[in-house]
Amino acid sequence: MDQNNQKKEPIPPLDFSSIMLPFHTQALIKLGQIVDPFTKEEKINLELAKRLIDLLELLKKKTQGNLDTEEEELLNQSLHQLKSLYLEKTKASPS
């Protein structure tokens, strides 16, 4: 197939959301909120979800004072959502 007939894969924007949203999406998958697009299964992994949340916390710490208001709000909302879902799942899971 020549290059003219190939579908172009979308290129994500070159902005802060392109860095943080993949972590957010993967955490949602590991929390069972989104079906894994590769396996087409819902498979909860709270340990990995926690690691992804921790990575976003690290990103927040390392970028503190360098984000614009919109970027900071996006990161804060992401962390709030993921932490809330994580707490729900850990309270619901048997000890």
Image: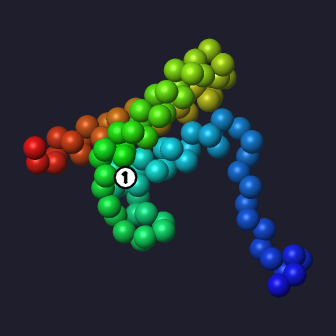
Residue 56, can we see it?
A: yes
Q: Residues within 10 Å of mark 1 (few under 14, many from 20)?
A: many
Examine the rendering and report whether any part of residue 77 can be seen: no
The residue under label 1 is which amino acid type?
Answer: Lys
Q: Position of residue 50 (x, y in %)?
A: 35, 39
Rendering coords of residue 87 (x, y %)? 26, 37
69 sits left or right of 92 in the view:
right
Relative image position of residue 68 (x, y in whole percent): 66, 23
Q: Is residue 53 above or below residue 4?
A: above
Residue at figure coordinates x 55%, y 47% from the top left:
22
Q: Quadrant of residue 7?
A: bottom right
Vertical comparison of 84 with 33: above or below: above
In this figure, which residue is indicated by the disc labeled 1?
30
Q: Position of residue 63 (x, y in %)?
A: 60, 22
Above or below, comparing residue 83 to residue 4 in the picture: above
Image point (73%, 65%), residue name:
9
> In the rendered image, which quarter contains the N terminus?
bottom right
Give me the residue at 35% from left, 35% from top: 83
Q: Give the answer, above or below, for where 22 lies relative to 60.
A: below
| Secondary structure found at label 1 | helix
